[in-house]
Amino acid sequence: MKNMTETTFTQDYEKRLSLFKDNFVVNWHEHVWEDSQSGKLRENSLDRLRKSAEATCTDAVICSIPLSKPCIPDDFSRVNRLQYEACQRWDKLYGLAFIHVGYTKEALYEIEKCVYDYGFVGIKLYHHYFIDDPQQFAVIEKCIELDIPILVHAGKSVQLRSTQPKLSAGHHFANIARLYPEANIIMAHIGGGGDWQWQIKAITDSPSIVTDISGSVVDAPMIEDAIKRLGARRILFGTDGSYEAGVGKILGANISEEDKKTILEGTAYRRFLNRRARK
């Protein structure tokens, strides 16, 4: 009986996974990591990511190496170089430039270097400043000029207030959308913990803001509610270190196959993948 159950489960999973096999799949939120001791790329982080992507027939993985602690320009320049090296080793990997907006001049230089020299397709911002802080404006304007997206670490969590006091929540994104409606901004990981319902509601009337489904939280009906409020074109597939959870959220969501395809393909953001041709 156990073997029959396992066989049935495997067959059902393979059937469901055809959604990934038969469509172009873009994972808009992943990371590889730096070895803090050697300063080199942590090889096992790239290996694990590659195996997960290949097992799920992912065609493109958008990736960065963020630094959560205070960092200086030499630090973000170093990790971006490591990200570039990782992209050179795997043609399905696309880089995002990680920068700290507290260093405006250096950040703007780094963005241009990463786009024009490394072929990166966007930037990654962490919780150093709220996304609607004026300190962000020069960087946002540079991204508008270059026509590249901005992936922003986000969440609505009481528990994180002490460790991430400038964590951008949905209302910060709504504010910046009013100031820069032409910016292409991704509110990261509605599945990353905290109040995902509040996050979705806060950006409902901000059509220029999209979100990704990454994170280990698999609450129902997260995907269904996001579809109702935002529509599939404003939702991107992402995993952020929780590949199985991300795949499961799509396979198990009670939404149409067409909406699932739209999320997996990242239809509204697909054009940004052509940016790597600049390299």
Image: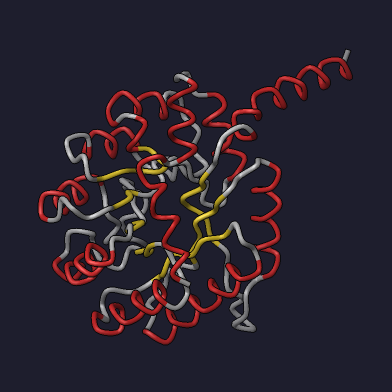
* Foreground of the two, 37 or 258: 258
What's the residue at 33%, 63% (across, down)? 127
Could you say where residue 64 lies in the image, as x and y percent from the top left? 48, 64
- Left or right, 159 with respect to 175, comes to right
- Which residue lies most toward the top here? 1
Residue 66 lies in quadrant: bottom left
Note whether 166 is above or below 178 in the view shown: below
- Which residue lies most toward the front here? 277
Could you say where residue 236 lies in the image, as x and y percent from the top left? 42, 41
Note whether 137 is above or below 108 in the view shown: above
Where's the N terminus, which quadrant? top right
The colour style of the image is secondary structure
Could you say where residue 104 lies in the image, as x and y percent from the top left? 24, 80
- Which residue lies most toward the bottom here? 74
What's the residue at 52%, 30% (across, down)? 250
- Left or right, 38 with respect to 197, comes to right
Residue 5 lies in quadrant: top right
Note whether 240 is above or below 119 in the view shown: above
Count every numbered label the image shows and give the total: 0
* Foreground of the two, 64 or 19: 19
What's the residue at 30%, 68% (across, down)? 128
What's the residue at 27%, 81% (across, down)? 103
- Left or right, 268 with respect to 86, comes to left
Could you say where residue 143 lies in the image, as x and y percent from the top left? 26, 65
* Foreground of the two, 215 or 274: 274
* Foreground of the two, 147 or 122: 147
